[in-house]
Image: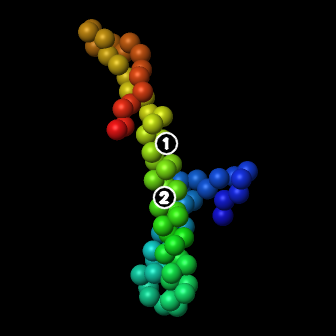
Amino acid sequence: MQTKDSPLTFEAAMRELEEIVTALEKGNVDLDKSIALYERGEQLKKHCDALLKNAEARIEKIVQGADGAAKGVEKLDVE
């Protein structure tokens, strides 16, 4: 579980999400627990989406000059 000092990583969130999906697919979880797991899964999905969007915004692409050599980088337009 995440804390303020150690936020949940993408990989940890995906592992937890996979565990939730597996538990729900098995179908041996009572209704209240299934609803709680589903809600947690939605939180994890939103967290992963936010982390991916942040990562995409940080990606830079290499800009090539007329001679084909790299001349610098610029932010990748993700929109």
Local secondary structure at mark 1: helix
What's under tag 2, amino acid-wise? Lys
Instruction: Assess disc 2: are there few (<14), some (14-19) or many (≥20) residues with their C-alpha within 10 Å of its C-alpha.
Output: few
Q: Is residue 19 visible?
A: no
Quarter of the image for the N terminus: give it: bottom right
What's under tag 1, amino acid-wise? Asn
Q: Residue at x 49, y 42 (%)?
A: 54
Q: In whole angstroms, how far apart are the C-alphas of marks 1 and 2?
A: 12 Å
Taking 1 as reference, is 44 left or right? left
**Residue 5 - label:** none
Q: Residue at x 66, y 59 (%)?
A: 2
Q: Earlier in the sequence, mark 1 or mark 2?
A: 2
The vertical placement of 26 against 49, above or below, is below
Instruction: Assess disc 1: are there few (<14), some (14-19) or many (≥20) residues with their C-alpha within 10 Å of its C-alpha.
Output: few
Q: Residue at x 26, y 9 (%)?
A: 66
Quarter of the image for the C terminus: give it: top left
Local secondary structure at mark 2: helix
| Residue 14 in picture, x, y percent from top left | 50, 61
Residue that badge 1 annotates: 54
Tally of marks: 2
| Residue 70 in picture, x, y percent from top left | 36, 15
In this view, the residue in front, 42 or 59, is 42
Residue that badge 2 annotates: 46
| Residue 39 in picture, x, y percent from top left | 52, 73
Q: Is residue 79 visible?
A: yes
